Image (cartoon, coloured by chain):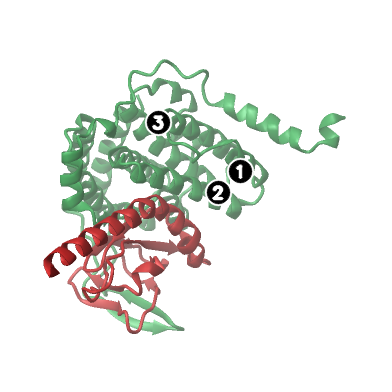
Chain colours: A green, B red
Amino acid sequence: MIAMRNPIWPVMLAVVTLLTACGGDPPQQDTLNVNDGLDSATQSARMKKTKNIFYNIPSPMETAALLKKAGADYNSKILNDVKNVDKYTAASQQALNLGVYGADLSYASVFNHTQESMFYTSCARKLADRLGVINAFNDSTLELMQSKMNDRDALLDVISETYWNVDAYLKENGRDNISALMIAGGWVEGLYIATQVAASNDSPELRQRIAEQKFALGDLIGLIESYEVDDERLNGVREDMKALQVLFADVNMGGGDNTVSDENGVAVIGGSAPAATLTDAQLGAIRDKAAAIRNTYIN
Amino acid sequence: MLNVRSILASAAAAGLLFLFAAPAQAQCKAFAKNKCVPELAPFKFNETFNAAQLAPGEEAEVNLTFFSGQEYRVMVCSHPILGEVNWKLVDANNKIVFESLADEPKHQFDLKATSTLQMKVVVWVPTKPKTELVHVGCVAILVGFKE
């Protein structure tokens, strides 16, 4: 009867359920010694070199939307197990898997699997909390998501805003290397999902979207290399990305000279060459490598 | 005497620059979120926080990938304290696709990519006469896409 009279109770119950859905109590952390150890001189030197250059990596939401448009299907079995969340005790692992769960969350949400979205949100929140990202995820975010469960577009907006809050918080608090790890984790998970989906649901459109990740990979390596800090984990991720870059090296990107025309006030821009694609061998090699790298991040 | 006055003026300008810069840094995210992101509608924000504190004479650039078949809005949003800023969108061959100059400003550019493109947005803040105080302000480069 109380629940019937007071509509806040179902929401609170759902939030409590979500908070317990993704693992148990957080284990003892080893350390949260992230970018804080960076001496101000090093930070200042990096700022001088890179302060005005940005690397725009496609977000997990954008990648998931591209996959859906390319005719990909949804497969929950390939996503990271929510029970893994408590295994991530090192800050670098938490950052990588915040990206991984963020990508899983976007994939589930874009394909309208809202219940799973909520579980992945809970995982992402736990990792964000442990990384000390204040106020990006809070109870009101979860309540808002719960209330928007039947409104896919509104739910996607909440998720987008939350991802941007986390990224902006990290960057504004001088923890760009943690942000870079999160972005790398999310991008690897997106590539993993795309290549796994292509294994069972192959299409030229899907191959094209995977091939086009060559551009994003170049930007991701540029982002990571803009940090001159001696961050072992970031160095390892850079080497992982360079190993993938070798596999993308011979991928034909199509394109050609761009022409610009006007269509109802919108500039239409593009080249005349055929779209990017992958051979079977290239797709297989990228799929295997992405799976191997992702495996080291989630385990 | 003139030198002393000049030094004092420089010190005061530097102090003011510092005073403006510190709170502006903290407010850059809020500025981008509240002022710029809503203007991307009906495009969906791509969730990437590209914003920096710039002073007159400074530049920022961001590499972007536009995927074939997708529609995008590129927006450069700057704090009013800076006045109008210049920006351009150039392709991989450095050919200018779009340019906005301070005397004829446009804050956004909509495009449809028929093939997947790598482009670059370059933003630069016009210099001001030396007599004016140097202000630092937030400049955000945002991208929206249609799902």
Instruction: Identify residue type, mark 1.
Output: Met
| Chain letter belonging to callout 2 | A
Q: Are marks 3 and 2 on the same chain?
A: yes
**For this view, does A161 lie left or right of residue B5?**
right
Q: Residue at x 22, y 34 (%)?
A: A38
State if disc 2 and disc 1 touch (CB < 8 Å): yes
According to the picture, the residue beneath numbered tag 3 turns out to be: A131
- Residue A158, which numbered label? 2
10 Å crowding of disc 2: few (<14), some (14-19), many (20+)? some
Q: Residue at x 42, y 32 (%)?
A: A132
Q: Is residue B87 above or below residue A231?
A: below
Question: Looking at the rendering, in which quadrant would you find the C terminus of chain A?
Answer: top left
> Which label belongs to residue A75?
none
What element does badge 2 sit on? helix
Q: CA distance from mark 1 to mark 3?
A: 22 Å
Q: Amino acid at mark 3?
A: Leu
The quadrant of the rendering that contains the N terminus of chain A is top right
Q: Quadrant of residue B80?
A: bottom left
